Image: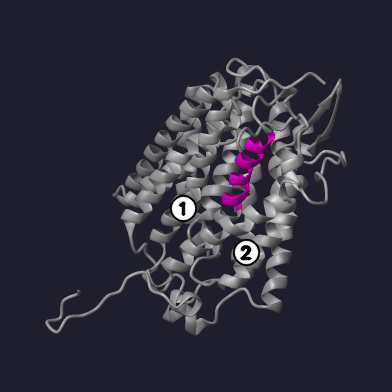
Amino acid sequence: MEAVVLNAGDTAWMLASCALVLLMTPGLAFFYGGMVRTKSVLNMMMMSMVTVGIVSVLWVVFGYELAFGSKAGSPWYGNIGFSNLGSRVEEFANNGGVYPIPLLVFAAFQLMFAIITPALISGAIADRTKFGAWALFVTLWSTLVYFPVAHWVFAFGNKVGDVVTGTGYLAGKGLEDFAGGTAVHINAGAAGLALALVLGKRVGWRRDSMRPHSLPLVMLGSGLLWFGWFGFNAGSALAANGIAGLALLNTQVAAGAALIGWLAFERLRNGHSTSLGAASGAVAGLVAITPACAFVDPIGAVAIGILAGVVCAWAVELKFKLGFDDSLDVVAVHLVGGILGSLAIGFVGTSGVNSLGLDGIFYGGGSALLAKQALGVGLVFAYSFVVTAILGFVINKTIGFRVNSVDEVEGIDLSEHAETAYDMKISSRGGVL
């Protein structure tokens, strides 16, 4: 095999991208934390933070090997065994090319994806989840669902001469998912739906007020997610090049367009445009453009963003008609947004901006690309939903996944963490100190 020529500029960009993507998980903690009630904000934020710790350890022990190892040559999983990243020196392929960065940097970058994906699921089961059960779920779900699915989508294999081994199933089928519309968002959204159904509705759902306790926290979290998403999408080019620039610009305009689309839907539907809608709309656009960011032009990104803002806002209302309690709209934003963005490539994808991409229907490419995208969407959804439902059911029937109703009503922060987010003391004059 030809020797890899490492590029210092590309490596520096990827190190920065690692930091940007890691920032997204604390940003998610603020975003979700502001959306829940005061009595469960700490538990909500802790579900994201403990995921950082658990997945980081799993990744270096065996997770990277399971996702990107190629010795076994399986399209469904990498290698079963210890990663031994410190001694790995082999070269590895990316869509037929060779990464211009050290393997450890690539492993660190992919770790950040592995961290945020299970953290996204937590919003679907807010206000009612045992912290220990969540930690166990993250461990099992990452091992049985995320690591294999990451192999299907992101593993392009090792190239030796003209032979490439270890290519993931969907990567080999030609799925276009630049930064994780299937592996991250549909994966997490399907899991969130499954857990919401297994755990059931919160006490007082649709009867009690469950409005966000801190919209400034929601806006802060949305801003941090938006900022970090540039590393998520543009960093997936694995180089500081024109494709990274395309992904960055598309990320920005899609998020802005979705924000406008969501606010317009709210205005027409309810007569008001809300800060929660602005924050949620931006995230919906970021989700939808994630798989498509390097395969569409900026006008296509605007179209995807507007559609995501409107469709995801409508999907939030749909959950009440369907009767399932997805606490923080993980299904509406991540599952629906991920599906929309993944399938949209089949319509507005164009090889004019990326020679590695195919033309969609609107660019004369026919339906072949759309069929590949639909395969990826369907397979990831089905696998994640079924395995998650089984895991949730088993955990719930053994150690219990849900807190008891008394603790849920009185406050999950106190019962699970012996803390409260805000220390409200009443003075002798009746004011809050």
Q: Is residue 192 above or below residue 272?
A: below
Q: Residue at x 41, y 64 (%)?
A: 36
Q: How many marks?
A: 2
Q: Residue at x 79, y 41 (%)?
A: 69
* Residue at the left extreme of this rendering: 429
* Residue at the top extreme of this rendering: 352
Q: Residue at x 45, y 57 (%)?
A: 32
Q: Is residue 30 above or below residue 226?
A: below
The foreground one among 189 and 427 is 427
Q: Position of residue 67 (x, y in %)?
A: 74, 44
* Residue at the front extreme of this rendering: 87
Q: Amino acid at mark 2?
A: Leu
Secondary structure under tag 2 reads helix
Using residue 374 as the reference point, say whether residue 162 is left or right of it: right
The foreground one among 330 and 8 is 8
Range of residues picked out in magenta = 103-117
Q: Position of residue 18 (x, y in %)?
A: 54, 39
* Of the two numbered discs 2 and 1 in the rendering, the one whose residue sits closer to the viewer: 1
Residue that numbered label 2 is attached to:
195
Q: Position of residue 132 (x, y in %)?
A: 60, 72
Query: Is the residue marked by circle 1 packed among few (<14), some (14-19), or many (20+) residues within 10 Å?
Result: many
Q: Name the disc covering residue 26, or none.
A: 1
Q: Amino acid at mark 1?
A: Pro
The foreground one among 212 and 93 is 93
- Residue 112 in the magenta stretch? The answer is yes
Q: Is residue 31 above or below residue 363?
A: below
Secondary structure under tag 1 reads helix
Query: Is the residue marked by circle 2 packed among few (<14), some (14-19), or many (20+) residues within 10 Å?
Result: many
Using residue 76 as the reference point, say whether residue 114 is left or right of it: left
- Residue 57 in the magenta stretch? The answer is no
